[in-house]
Image (spheres, rainbow, N blue to C red):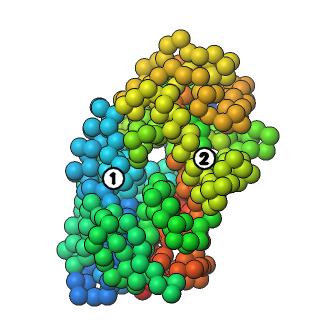
């Protein structure tokens, strides 16, 4: 915390919150200070529990080593229970090699990619820690835990805290070592392929189609892209519900355009970070909005199967790449899924999947992604060429109307024209739309009892985090993991 303390005469200052107000012509850095007059600062100690050995304690299985699963495991240890984590992907170090192959050669490993593996989707997709979910749990506790495991303490004061893809792996490794040292277990390359359910109660798990792990409490924290888990639950007549989500494109601008637009300047000053933005529009009662904005970022290939294309974005901790990208998505309501009603509660999943497969075909091969310049898209003109783009597998000039449903294209066009009137520099053919941004949240909710947090039908099954429909991002997923672990104990 020392870097956030200043001394001047008889006054001591401690920065509590920091944000940027760029609404006026001259941007301001806003600070919320705790001021001490004629006394020394007393910095409160971060409380981190002692993780004592739980090697021989009662076991709780956790499916998935993302933020929900890891924070559930730490909480179980704190409460005297032994977590046993089953993660279908690899550890963060081995996972990095599969991501390199995906980016450079366009080859997808269905078990180890940007979505699957130790740390979950957020590990190599940015590490944003901003959340509006204060009512769901103690945000401060989550941030304190990240700091304890190696994150910069600035995440506790920044309005939009961000760890960075380059720093998160070391933090995740530190969490893993703590879990293992306390007697917990983490099994990688361990995909859950069946649930042993008897008399509407969990009895155990099948791993990799052969090994059986007997347990009567299971935290299901698989994330929003584990489609095989949704299909398995559906096949076993375990109750699921379709839920609204959002889908669209990832849009990329040169960062200097966003800086100029937000900071009202031709050149960003050295004390200002790369600018971000948040845009919300409405078209015929339907929400259209920016999502997961990455200043100084990179567009990543986030497919989890070989015959689909999915995009997402991330930034390193310094946010020093020349491009700014953001999801720009359209709200999808259950009424939009009429053409997929034969799939029941899985309708949204197959709606997503159909678009991702169209984009795979349009992209040619090796994870190439269909793309179109912004103004060309609005004017329904195929781009004669495309600008430089951070998406490593490459982008292919495409009429995006051929891969996106008509109501999504119409909503995006209208939103861009609205933006043109109030942020004219945003509307430019230097910006490129890359399709699709389709994994904004789970299209399925796994219903649970509001008091016990167990599945409403299956005793001992605890749906948790983003994949179950109870979180949206790292912090809210971590909080939900803690809540579920606390209920079990």
* Viewer-side residue, 185 vs 309: 309
Taking depth in this image into account, of 285 and 478 the one nearest to the observer is 285
Point out the residue furthest to the left here. 181
Residue at 53% across / 45% down in the picture? 353
Residue 192 in view here: yes
Q: Position of residue 313 (x, y in %)?
A: 45, 40
Judged left or right of residue 483, residue 287 is right
**Which numbered disc flags the more N-terminal residue, 1 or 2?**
1
Q: Residue furthest right?
A: 284
485 and 187: which one is in front?
A: 187
Q: Which mark is residue 111?
A: 1
**What label does residue 351 carry, if any?**
2
* Quarter residue 354 falls in: top right
C-alpha distance separating marks 1 and 2: 22 Å
* Residue 241 position within the rendered picture, expressed as x and y whole percent measured from the top left: 63, 65
* Dot 1: element: loop
Which residue is depicted at the point 52% across and 48% down? 439
Above/below status of 97 relative to 139:
above
């Amino acid at each position: 915390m020392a870097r956030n303390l200043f001394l001047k005469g008889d006054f001591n200052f401690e920065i509590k919150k920091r944000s940027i107000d760029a609404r006026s012509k001259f941007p301001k850095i806003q600070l919320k200070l705790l001021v001490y007059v004629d006394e020394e600062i007393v910095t409160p100690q971060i409380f981190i529990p002692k993780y004592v050995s739980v090697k021989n304690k009662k076991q709780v299985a956790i499916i998935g080593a993302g933020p929900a699963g890891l924070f559930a495991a730490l909480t179980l240890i704190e409460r005297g229970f032994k977590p046993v984590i089953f993660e279908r992907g690899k550890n963060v170090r081995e996972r990095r090699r599969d991501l390199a192959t995906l980016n450079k050669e366009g080859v997808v490993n269905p078990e180890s990619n940007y979505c699957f593996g130790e740390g979950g989707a957020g590990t190599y997709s940015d590490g944003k820690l901003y959340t509006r979910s204060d009512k769901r749990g103690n945000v401060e506790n989550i941030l304190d835990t990240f700091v304890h495991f190696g994150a910069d303490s600035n995440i506790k004061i920044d309005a939009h805290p961000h760890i960075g893809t380059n720093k998160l792996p070391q933090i995740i490794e530190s969490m893993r070592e703590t879990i293992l040292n306390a007697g917990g277990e983490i099994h990688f390359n361990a995909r859950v392929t069946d649930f042993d359910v008897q008399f509407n109660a969990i009895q155990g798990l099948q791993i990799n189609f052969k090994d059986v792990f007997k347990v009567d409490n299971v935290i299901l924290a698989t994330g929003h892209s584990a489609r095989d888990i949704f299909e398995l639950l559906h096949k076993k007549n375990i109750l699921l519900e379709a839920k609204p989500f959002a889908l669209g494109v990832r849009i990329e601008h040169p960062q200097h355009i966003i800086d100029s637009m937000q900071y009202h300047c031709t050149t960003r000053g050295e004390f200002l970070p790369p600018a971000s933005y948040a845009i919300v529009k409405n078209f015929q009662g339907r929400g259209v909005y920016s999502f997961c904005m990455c200043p100084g970022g990179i567009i990543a290939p986030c497919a989890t199967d070989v015959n689909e294309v999915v995009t997402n974005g991330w930034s390193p901790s310094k946010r020093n790449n020349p491009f700014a990208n953001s999801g720009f998505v359209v709200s999808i309501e259950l009424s939009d899924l009429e053409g997929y009603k034969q799939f029941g509660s899985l309708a949204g999943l197959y709606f997503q999947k159909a678009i991702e497969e169209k984009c795979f075909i349009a992209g040619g091969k090796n994870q190439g992604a269909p793309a179109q310049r912004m103004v060309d898209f609005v004017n329904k003109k195929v781009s004669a060429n495309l600008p430089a783009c951070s998406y490593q597998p490459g982008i292919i000039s495409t009429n995006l109307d051929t891969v996106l449903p008509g109501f999504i294209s119409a909503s995006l066009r209208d939103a861009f024209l609205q933006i043109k009137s109030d942020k004219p520099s945003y509307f430019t053919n230097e910006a490129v739309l890359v399709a699709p941004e389709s994994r904004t949240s789970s299209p399925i909710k796994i219903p649970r009892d509001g008091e016990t947090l167990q599945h409403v039908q299956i005793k001992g099954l605890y749906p948790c985090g983003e994949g179950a429909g109870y979180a949206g991002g790292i912090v809210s997923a971590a909080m939900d993991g803690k809540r579920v672990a606390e209920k079990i104990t």
